[in-house]
Image (spheres, rainbow, N blue to C red):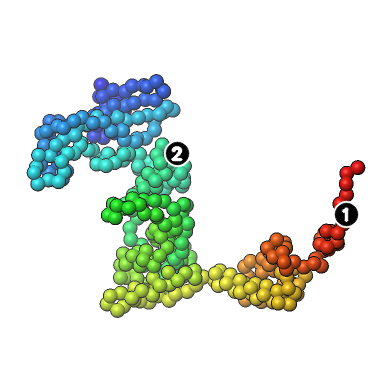
Amino acid sequence: MDQSTTVLFGLPGVRVRRVERVESGARVVHVETAEGGSVAGCPGCGVVSVSVKENVITRPGDLPYGETPLTVEWHKRRWRCREPLCARLTFTEVIEEVSAGRRTTGRLRRAIACAVGDACRSVAEAAEAFGVSWPTAHATVIEAALAQLGDPEPVTVLGIDETRRGRPRWTYDVQSTRWVRTDAWDTGFVDLQPGAGGQGLLGQVEGRTSACVVDWLRQRTPEFRAAVQFVAIDPAAVYAKAIRTVLDDGSRLLPNARLVVDHFHLVKLANDAVTTVRRRVIWEQQGRRGRKIDPALTMPPPAAVRTGTPIAQGVHNDVEFSDRLRPGRADPHRLDRQGRTAGAVRARPHRRAP
């Protein structure tokens, strides 16, 4: 085919053989390796091979162009490696845009990473727009982020918290040859330095265990670990255990860090404690669950626990389920909206239709 078609297609390393349209209306671009000759070097040992085993066709994903679907079919050779000491028996041709084992072109991966990182589009939206699966788009974004992001600068206030990232997945572990259930939670590390000088999100690892926190901190420089003065967490024992980790030489993982708990969880624990006491007192005094008219619920909470969810409202929401959850201890003198007790409603004769 004319060289102008190859220039228009614009994928370095290949040249266009022909372009055809199938019955569905989609276009198929047949390409071949531009510099493919009668010899090729083995990527395992580097020995040049002159033995062609077969011709194969791969279909790497590429950038969409136009209104109809576009498919790329790459016609390439599979070579034999004649080196007896080489573990690789065969290999195929590769180019810079589509390396060995890749199923997408480099320009497609760069476009997906730009859509998510620069245009602030979600991974799901970018995956649908470029015709790839969500895991492929997510792996592309991670690859681009690791290539651009460096090691974080030392911080004085480090925040650690978990984030749920969807449903658990099953992955195949090659070493154990078993399917392993992945954790549905991620642990994030945030710079809590006040003001505009903060770095924001420093890193994120899979899982919410002590091991994942220790591994991430071990990967940081000694200067980074020594600069941390405070570590803010929620009341999670696994995170506290990781911060108190002692290294093999007897020193602490974070030698100068003090462990603090964010005030939101402390206030919530205080509210829960007061709610538990009020419910227990009402059961002991009244023999039933609480109501809005009970003095234990009408009194305002102490100033120390007044912030957060109102305790009285939380108890009142449970009152309407008292008869259903504890039918044997329901109050017989409780009135309905018309001022009648439960016994009066049961004793009322049923009306028959005329």
From the image, which quarter does the N terminus lie in? top left
The amino acid on which the numbered mark 1 sits, given as a three-letter code, is Pro
Of labels 2 and 1, earlier in sequence is 2
Q: Quadrant of residue 72?
A: top left
- According to the image, label 1 marks what residue? 349
Residue 128 - label: 2
53 or 323, which lies in front? 323
Rendered residue at 35%/52% (across/down): 179
From the image, which quarter does the C terminus lie in? top right
Please tell me whether mark 2 or mark 1 is closer to you in this view: 1
| Numbered disc 1: secondary structure | loop
Rendered residue at 26%/24% (across/down): 17
Residue 325 on image: x %, y %? 68, 63
Residue 66 on image: x %, y %? 41, 28
Q: Do the residues labelled 2 and 1 touch (CB within 8 Å)?
A: no
Label 1 neighbour load within 10 Å: few <14, some 14-19, many 20+ = few
Q: In this view, does 348 lie above or below 240?
A: above
205 or 64, which lies in front? 205
Q: What is the CA distance from the residue labelled 2 to the residue labelled 1?
A: 64 Å
Q: In which quarter of the image is residue 231?
A: bottom left
Residue 37 - label: none
Residue 272 on image: x %, y %? 61, 71
Label 2 neighbour load within 10 Å: few <14, some 14-19, many 20+ = few
293 or 145, which lies in front? 293
